[in-house]
């Protein structure tokens, strides 16, 4: 699943290539991916892209109306093409987008990357939203205001914003005594961090993923805050400027522990270990993060005694 660094890179990539271009076609291939009906997707046609931004893991393509007076009202007000790539979604850019008709489909269980939405621009270029796997979770919204989408309206603090201070993190950690990995992945608390980068952050902070948030000392909170910011900033810098098709490989190459079960920890040389759950897994280094103790590999994992 793309997380904040990759989504930021995708936003920059699309912004540089679409801003100032006019949409000439917007065709839905996967009906289930479209979560809104008013305005319709066809309302994007004829509008000019005014920029692409990010809200947590959501991408936001802002498009003007042909007669927009800038007052935010009426049929010619800006529209937003909002989409969340979820686990199997991706953006595929084409300098020459296909012009063949897109046939809508109601469902499907294909494991390969299937087309969900195609947007074509007035210079012939465009992008596809695709989704791989059998569990289709790609979400596409066409709205007048991003805040109309509940998952966007309820996002927590952006960890790369000025609002994400050590004090702000400490307040979040005091709200509920929970496992720290769960807090980092909670989009209503901190927007943009998922399974992969939470593993990376906790490894940098030298913290167990199951350490309870209210057990952190002020120094440990400060260290975790620094790990969040530096890990994400480094990942954004590594992703910036890369073509969309290279971002997945760049993400995997930059991981220290996530997805590296059985390999050597780059810090201490101990083996990277894994805890598996029903639909995901986490990776950690026992030497760096748990004082050498191995976490039990079961859903309600606790330190082995």
Image (cartoon, grey):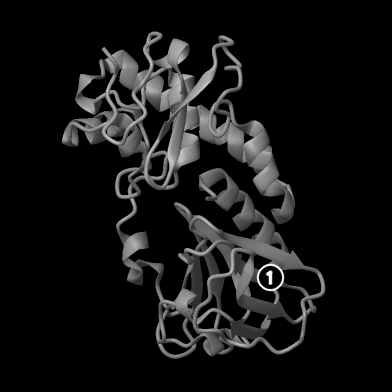
- The residue lying toward the viewer, choosing from 124 and 129, is 129
Relative placement, left or right, of 82 versus 305 is right
Which element is circle 1 on? strand
Q: Which residue is mark 1?
A: 127
Q: Residue 180: x, y in percent?
A: 31, 30
Q: Name, please, the residue furthest toward the right.
A: 96
Image quadrant in which you'd find residue 280: top left
Q: Is residue 32 left or right of residue 5?
A: left
**Residue 9 in sight in this render:** yes
The x, y position of residue 233, in whole percent, is: 56, 34
**Few, some or many C-alpha atoms within 10 Å of disc 1 (few <14, some 14-19, many ≥20)?**
many
Residue 160 visible in the current orientation = no
- Work out which quarter of the rendered image holds the C terminus and state it: top left
What is the number of callouts on the image? 1
* Residue shown at 24% from the left, 31% from the top: 173
Query: Which residue is rendered at x = 27% and y = 17% of the image?
Result: 218
Query: Which of the two residues, 305 or 235, is positioned nearer the viewer here?
Result: 305
Q: Is residue 244 above or below residue 110?
A: above
Q: Which residue lies at the image location 47% right of the left edge and 53% below the top edge?
A: 57
């Amino acid at each position: 699943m793309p997380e904040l660094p990759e989504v930021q890179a995708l936003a920059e990539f699309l912004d540089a290539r679409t801003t100032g271009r006019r949409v000439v076609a917007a065709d839905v291939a996967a009906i289930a991916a479209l979560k809104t009906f008013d305005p319709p997707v066809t309302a994007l046609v004829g509008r000019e892209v005014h920029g692409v931004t990010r809200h947590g893991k959501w991408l936001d393509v802002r498009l003007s109306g042909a007669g927009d007076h800038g007052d935010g009202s009426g049929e010619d007000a800006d529209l937003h093409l909002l989409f969340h790539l979820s686990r199997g979604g991706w953006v595929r850019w084409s300098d020459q987008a296909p012009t063949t008709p897109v046939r809508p489909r109601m469902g499907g269980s294909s494991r390969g990357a299937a087309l969900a939405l195609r947007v074509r621009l007035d210079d012939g270029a465009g992008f596809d939203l695709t989704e791989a796997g059998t569990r289709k979770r790609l979400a596409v919204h066409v709205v007048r205001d991003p805040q109309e989408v509940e998952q966007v309206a309820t996002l927590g603090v952006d960890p790369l914003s000025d609002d994400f201070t050590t004090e702000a993190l400490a307040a979040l950690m005091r709200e509920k005594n929970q496992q720290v990995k769960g807090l980092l992945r909670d989009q209503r608390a901190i927007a943009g961090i998922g399974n992969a980068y939470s593993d990376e952050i906790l490894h940098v902070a030298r913290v167990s993923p199951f350490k309870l948030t209210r057990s952190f000392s002020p120094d440990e909170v400060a260290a975790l805050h620094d790990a969040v910011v530096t890990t994400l900033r480094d990942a954004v810098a590594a992703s910036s400027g890369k073509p969309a098709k290279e971002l997945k490989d760049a993400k995997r190459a930059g991981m220290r522990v996530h997805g590296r079960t059985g390999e050597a920890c780059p810090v201490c040389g101990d083996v990277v270990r894994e805890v598996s759950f029903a639909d995901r897994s986490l990776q950690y280094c026992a030497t760096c993060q748990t004082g050498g103790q191995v976490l039990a590999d079961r859903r309600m994992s606790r330190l082995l005694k």
